[in-house]
Image (cartoon, helix red, strand yellow):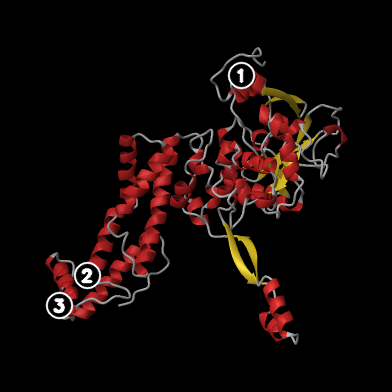
Amino acid sequence: MIPPQGHQTTNTDLDRALNLESGFTYPPIDPKTHIRLLRPSPKASAGELDFAFEIVHLDRLSDIRYKALSYTWGRISTSADLHTVKINNQPFLVRKNLFDFLNSNPFSDDQALIPIHTQQPHHLVFIDALCINQFDSQERQSQVQLMTQIYRRSTSVIAWLGLPPPSLLPSIQSLASISPTLPPTSWTPSQLSAHNYLSNHPYWTRLWVLQELLFAPTATIRCGPSSFPLRHFSSPHPSRTRAGSPAERLTTHRLRALPLPRHDPLHMGTTILPLSEMVKTLSDTPYYKIHEYQSPVPDTLQEIFTHYGHLECSDPRDKLYGFLGLLSAKSRKLIRADYEKGVDFAFYQSLKVGLGEVAREVESDMITGEYEGVNGGWIGGYYKLVGEVFGMDEEEGRRMLKKVVKELRLEEWLAEVAVVVGAGWRVGGVVSLGEIQRGLDCWDARGESGRGEKGWLERLHGRQESAARRIGGRFGRARVVLRV
């Protein structure tokens, strides 16, 4: 039962608690190999929001047409924020923003979902709050690992910004009617105001949005009855009105611009024409066109936390789990999205995996002759960054840092780095023989290198090679290139 209208609550999971109390049951699935999709019920009457689940194996996702919804759940302040829909012939409470989406007509261009009573049953959509059993932490844990696949294999992603303020509705509709290639200098003041509202909408502060849009095959931004292509909010050469907006920062995260020639300059320059006409042709025809593409290079945790650690999520553990799709396959395998454990476990995993990533970068810097990271200062810098993202208690955070440093054997690794660099391994640099000899004497004094019958150069090469192999093998590098 929904509490009386106007009833105040501080429980942000009110909808989950009430749906559980009502006895709502999900059709069972194997959450590692299947997902649920939502389709309109063919039995729904006019004006009724009636849905049914369809269970789909992951192997079939690329063969069927479905959309994926990206939106903000929204906070619950009163019971007025909860509304009832029907799923599998059971009542289910949803929050206002999702209800507005389901109750509007945002798919009128392709007749995908609403109005319910006029649609065919094969139209499918993925909505995380409905399709994932929010009562089951094990299912949530498994399905979070599949988010990249679900959004990447969808036909398109719909980014729902909610209903606009009535006063801005005409301006937003006007903006939707113009070409996204029209420069902002040609927009009217009301269109500029609408674009500013859309670009700074709270939707863009949501953590999950980043990977949902990044992996979308195509994406459409919806605000009430109006829709916009994603490129309306992204540009590799941002204009004054777009620069720095939350929308642009997210949509251009991996966007790259490559200038390509439009025409063959040799052909254009050797065409037999009067000189004046040739000059005019060359000057009037832009030589370059800009090709935009998404970079496939995965992010490191340090990069993600630096740029996007401020983004919002209802569960602080998602400060890590909500970024899994952006990481390399190697880093993803090391992280377990465990919702049965607390925030401290997500913090611990962020430290361990992130420090391992940074250490591999330091190794690469060493091979190319850069040594800024060999003093270990990056350990404290990364620890401080992760602590700010998760808001960890200082004492608990330091305890976990010591644990991670020990598990990764970072102190031993840094000692090896210091010996190799301090003894004269300078890739691309010049080192005096005296400095090399002093390094060897230092090793001998510590009992780490025997003089025997070996010459000093042979001893140096042997020591450097063994140390470098230990350094490279610490974090899984396939091989270390030695240049001595």
Q: Position of residue 255 (x, y in %)?
A: 59, 57
Q: Earlier in the sequence, mark 1 or mark 3?
A: 1
Towards the viewer: 312 or 128: 312
Whole-number angstrom distance, CA of label 1 to CA of label 3: 82 Å
- Of the 4 image quadrants, the one containing the N terminus is top right
Q: Position of residue 188 (x, y in %)?
A: 70, 45
The residue tagged 3 is: 452
Towards the viewer: 473 or 321: 321
The residue at 65%/23% (across/down) is 81
Q: Earlier in the sequence, mark 1 or mark 2?
A: 1
**Mark in front: 1 vs 2:** 1
Q: Amino acid at mark 3?
A: Gly
The residue tagged 1 is: 78
Q: Earlier in the sequence, mark 3 or mark 2?
A: 2
Element carrying mark 3: loop
Mark 1, Cα crowd under 10 Å, few <14 / some 14-19 / many 20+, is: some
Towards the viewer: 429 or 118: 429
Element carrying mark 1: loop
The residue tagged 2 is: 423
Q: Is residue 257 above or below residue 63?
A: below
The residue at 61%/13% (across/down) is 7
Q: Amino acid at mark 2?
A: Ala
The residue at 74%/80% (across/down) is 277
Residue at the left extreme?
445
**Mark in front: 1 vs 3:** 1
Instruction: State left or right for residue 80 relative to residue 388.
Output: right
Q: Can see residue 225? A: yes
Asked which quadrant contains residue 24, the reply is top right
Residue at the top extreme?
4
Whole-number angstrom distance, CA of label 3 to CA of label 2: 19 Å
